[in-house]
Image (spheres, rainbow, N blue to C red):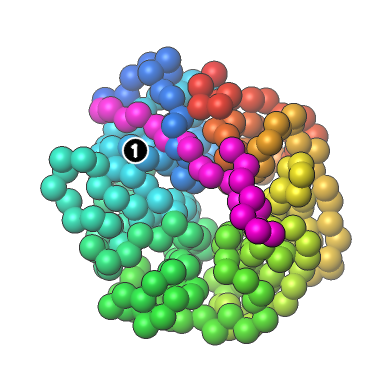
Amino acid sequence: MLHKTGSLVFIVLSFGISLASPARAASSVTLTHVHGLSYSADGKQIFVPSHDGLAIYSEGKWHKAPGPGNDYMGFSATKQFFYSSGHPAPGSGLTNPFGLLKSGDGGRTWHKRGLEGEADFHLLATCYETNAVYVYTHAPNSRMSKPGIYSTVNDGFSWNHAESKGLDGVPSALAVHPSNNKNIAAGTKTGLFFSTDGGDTFKRLASGEQVLAAFFDLDGKQLWFSSYDGKPYLARLDWSSGKKTVINLPPLTRDAVAYIAQNPAKRTEYAIATFERNVYLTQDQGKTWNQIANRGQTQ
């Protein structure tokens, strides 16, 4: 559902997934919150993290992933690992919130990487090739002295604060270049911004409405971003030349793109998830779309 507070348009997330182990039939999967969207490295699976675990779309079917039914927030995948934050499942006895978590087995098991009990990063982005992690924290903690963008290149052992000069507004989206982890993008309520020095300085790439999602194409040349200004908008931008291509979206009613992902093995294939729990696939870079979830009901 779309809401407006002052001049800031935002969309309330209400996505989630019922999770059980072992995996069950597609009819048992309902997306009640969506907190991310990522492909597996071989391109055969799409992972949708949620309020109570992971759902997987593979070979035309949905199933519930094996593993703990935790509330995964800020979920992001690299070539080798999953990174996330969030909250433990009820009754698990785990410390809340998680801080930074890492999984090397598709989310079956997770390893603590610091800030347990201190931080829940709703905004988290990773570098696909280098495993660098960027987060935005709204409040200080034992590793982060003040709110802002921070990054780690050693799985949370140490964090670097980004000065964020030139960034207008609080980030609502973060993305990291797939191979150069100094190149990052941030979306705010005033537009899309780009940095080549790890977030110390930013320049504006697009202005206007609030940027809701940002994603670097795996070729490193294209930067996708979404917004909403009375109607949903999705574009692909060549960040070096400034050339922009508007992407044709499927019919969305008071809805917008919340997450964007690309198939690493078939790079003309992309997936999008919306704030109203719709999930679509395209095999031709957005010319046509196939819906695989309709307001949380998987298809």
Residue 131 x %, y %? 45, 64
Taking the magenta stretch, the answer to whether it contains residue 148 is no
**Local secondary structure at mark 1:** strand
- Residue at (70%, 40%) from the top-left corner? 268
- Residue at (32%, 24%) from the top-left corner? 23
Q: Is residue 126 visible?
A: yes
Q: Quadrant of residue 84?
A: bottom left
Q: Amino acid at mark 1?
A: Gly
The C terminus appears in which quarter of the rendering?
A: top right
Return the residue at label 1. Answer: 53
Q: Nearer the viewer, residue 94 or 156?
A: 94
Q: What's drawn in magenta, residue-wise?
A: 1-21
The N terminus appears in which quarter of the rendering?
A: top right
Above or below, 265 relative to 146: above
Above or below, 206 relative to 281: below
Above or below, 33 relative to 209: above
Q: Is residue 124 left or right of residue 250?
A: left
Q: How many marks?
A: 1
Residue 86 x %, y %? 34, 52
